[in-house]
Image (cartoon, coloured by chain):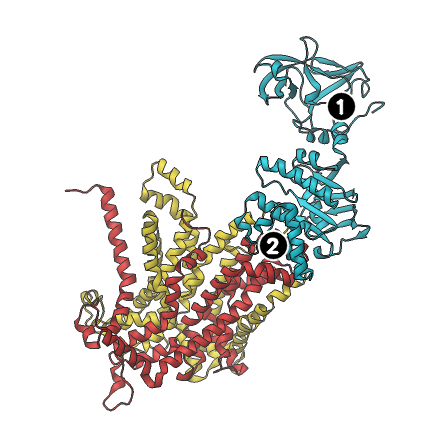
Amino acid sequence: MATVTFDGATRIYPKTEQAAVDALDLEVDDGELLVLVGPSGCGKTTTLRMLAGLEHVDEGSIRIDGKDVVDLAPRDRDIAMVFQNYALYPHMNVAQNMGFALRMAGVAKAEIDERVRAAAKILEIEGYLERKPRQLSGGQRQRVAMGRAIVRQPRVFLMDEPLSNLDAKLRVATRAEIAALQRNLGVTTLYVTHDQVEAMTMGDRVAVMKDGLLQQCDTPRVLYEDPVNAFVAGFIGSPPMNLVAGVVESGGVRLGSTLLRVADGVPSPPGAAVTVGLRPESLFLAPAAEGIPATVSIVEELGAEAFVYAQLVSATGAGNGLNVKGNIIARVEPSTAPRNGEVIHLGVKEGSLLFFDAESGDRIRRRGE
Amino acid sequence: MALPRRHAIQVVALVILLFFTAFFFVPMIWLFLAPTKTDGQLLTQSPFAFGSFHTLAQTFHRVVTYSGHSVLTWLKNSAIYSFGGTALAVVAAIPAGYGLALTQFIGRRLLLSITLVVMIMPATALVLPLFLEINKLGLYGTIWSLILPFGFFPFGVYLAYIYFSSTIPRDLLAAARIDGAGEWAVFRYIALPLARPIVSLVGFFAFVASWNNFFLPFVMTYDSSQYPLQVGLQQLIGSTASFNPANFSAGSSIVVLHRPDLAMAVIVAIAPVLIVFLFAQRALVSGMLAGATKE
Amino acid sequence: MTVPAAAAVPDGRASARRGNWAAGKREHPLAGSSRTAGYFFVAIYVALLALLGIAPVVYAIYLALSNSGGFGSSFVNAFNDYRFLPAFEHILEFMGLWLVSQTILVVGLTLMLHNLAQRVGAVFRFLFYIPGALAGAASVIVWLFMLDPSASPFAFVLHWFGYAQFNNTIAPGNLPAIFAIMAFWTGAGGWIVVMYGALNNIPHELLESAQIDGANAFKTALFIKLPLIRKWVVYMLVLSFAGGTQLFVEPTVLGSAALGVGVSKYWSPNQLAWFVASQYDNFNEAAAISVVLLVLGLAIAAVLVWRGRLFEAE
């Protein structure tokens, strides 16, 4: 059982200017499943590999149970890792793959067999112990990779996008299994993914990274309800939050020619440029003349719900490379779904608006938030 | 009656291909038929006629018993030099290719560049300098004067380097390191078992290069008892009547050989390499052209 | 000729390209490895390289320069040797014939084979490739037979040229052509395999789109395939040139079947170097000649490695 601490950990690749991971401070509690999430190139995998000892730490320290491991070789860190492509030893059968770490540690053969069998039982792969990796399906390989990790009973599990090579259906089933398994075993786990749904469903806490910088680390609910900046707001949630450029006026925010009334107080003095965050699920179809007018581009009917992709009639989208064209997504009841090309009016649920600085993207908190 | 132009071109292409097939392959056929005939039959019969098994046996017997079974001695020498050199080449090249591809050390790039240069440079360019050096070191006339140079095989190092850097995912080695393997264990338990194809490929190329080498053993050996087959063949030419009649003045004690005997000796000399060429051809070509085969 | 060595090179290229893919897009090549373990793995090879690759070169240069006649006098002696220039003329003539015919024929034959059905092409390639097993003295002996008008299956060709006897065929003026034929016979098959591999690296879509653009087989070969394998042709040419300067086996073995007529014992530069070393114990002049050849080979190799970008050295 262990805690993991990143303390100003920095990785700068040779011949590059920008740090791949920039002064990361992060604490993983004992037994916790912490998910690192972010777009590709955000530094999440580098972070994981730094903890594994596969990547050099240029500055700062990484501690497991309070002990600095920066100068330890991977094999001395008592960690196990599940790789994206599983990295199963192709010339060894499943049992040998799972037992390799124990063999390296000089564990007696009988005990290796016993522990491999026990792990295989948990993962329901006892039937394949004699097979080579190439004789297994993708899902089975994934289980073997998991088995190889749990058989060691390490202090920390590292998982690098372990589900990305599975098809969509299997991925959903497996992510629940992994989360349940992790909770049963109670082993501290750092889990990397680019998929925010995976992050939200699996993580005790989720750390969102971008450009080597940690943006926010908190429980899935807090990330969703209380993002610290426009990036996190836009990254978390599916479909993502709408970010629209606006100008503060007394009593509301002007989006193009439409004034959006804000009953619970405006974020900034009148005249300030802000980015307004609107969750698709906070929008509803309002009577004409009341909401924000938008022209429907596409309607996605998913059965239980429908998503309306529309273009704001008079407003422009937010800067920061987000939503430049003024697109907006709204979740509506399938029975009330509009048709393509129709002009609709979107109302906003009370108290669901978020405001961000138009320049920096930082959250502007109003009193009481 | 004019053929369509398309067909005319195809016919011309076919004729050219058949011509070169004859050029490349007729000598091989001839070589294998020659020992079945007597020297006289060689002149009178069609080049593609088969003589008799009886004659073949006689030819074989003459070659083997020539000059106190010299051919067997040469065969043994060839085997010692080639297998010794090949073993050394493999033992040196496989870890070196691994080291160059998957480990990190100061001077790695330099070593790689030197390896490439020495590999491309014709090996024969080093023969005389090697002779001078071996002479100086007092190794002249020992088996080491051949086994050591045969074991120095930069091309094998390059093959192993390419193999390790291209076919072994780095995550596999990372996984082993996380699993507690040290540098030697990573090589021993992960890289080496996966390197089996390249071990045989390097071994094969080293063997062929050593077995077929003429210049180096020609320079390094001075007595018939040390010759490998390649050099021995040259001595056989000297004993072949039709190529060197001057050597066989009346009363000469030199054993006279004839053309079929010489052909037989050539077959004995090339047999090991030819067998590998024939039976491992698929593996060889696929090894040489991994990833480049037409679907 | 070192055809097996040459033949395997495209492999490196092709699989190395695959390798970049296999290794993944992220760049973390030597992660977690020790910084000194590498020395251990290359140790045996480095020892061999030093002893058998570098030391002989250094020693040969030392010998060539340290003549009692004064600094550089071995080179002067070598250049002034009446046999020195003719030896180089011989191999130049040989290489002129060999390189031109090999380039045209290997490229032409490969392009033809590439138009055949895969299986048929494979049979031809195999037949062309097999003589490669006979490098060295064996192939020279086979050609002794082929050039002997009394026994050769090609006797009718020899008779056309008016050669009735073996020593007619191996007249000194014919030697460059004879050595060119021998070298082509053993080496061309390997190169055809190489070129064929290079042609197979051309994406199918490219050839199909050329067809749709209206190119026939001949024009596709000329305008699409040939330019795309050009660097391999250059590579073959340069490597063959380097190998050709080292000619030794063919004249030596042919010389031992001389029938009293003249293949001289110093027909090629390598033979000359060996001749002065073994007959006169003049190691200094031998070293000087071999250094000249060595510099030629080294220069060509260095140009290929550093300028050619043919090899995957990262």
Q: Which residue is mark 1?
A: A354
Q: Which chain is red?
A: B
Task: Please give the label number shown on residue C216.
Answer: none
Q: Is residue A104 left or right of residue A301?
A: right
- State which quadrant residue A213 falls in: top right
The residue under label 1 is which amino acid type?
Answer: Leu
Instruction: Give the chain ID for the yellow colour.
Output: C
Give the vertical position of A31 relative to A246 (above or below): below
How crowded is the residue under tag 2: few (<14 C-alpha within 10 Å), some, or many (20+)? Answer: many
Q: Amino acid at mark 2?
A: Ala
Q: Residues within 10 Å of mark 1 (few under 14, many from 20)?
A: many
Q: Residue at x 46, y 53 (%)?
A: B290
Residue B288 % position (x, y):
44, 57
Which mark lies nearer to you, 1 or 2?
2
Q: Secondary structure at mark 2?
A: helix
Q: Position of residue C281 (x, y in %)?
A: 45, 84
What is the C-alpha distance between the residues marked 1 and 2? 53 Å
Q: Secondary structure at mark 1?
A: strand
Q: Which residue is mark 2?
A: A95
Between A149 and B129, the one lying in front of the other is A149
Classify the position of the C terminus of chain C by image quarter: bottom right
* Image mark 2: chain: A
Front residue of C48 and A207: A207
> Which chain's colour is cyan?
A
Q: Nearer the viewer, residue C187 or A69?
A: A69
Q: Quadrant of residue A369?
A: top right
Subunit that carries the residue with mark 1: A
Which of disc 2 and disc 1 is earlier in sequence?
Answer: 2
Instruction: Have a look at marks 1 and 2 and say if they share a chain.
Output: yes
Front one among A169 and B279: A169
Q: Is residue B255 visible?
A: yes
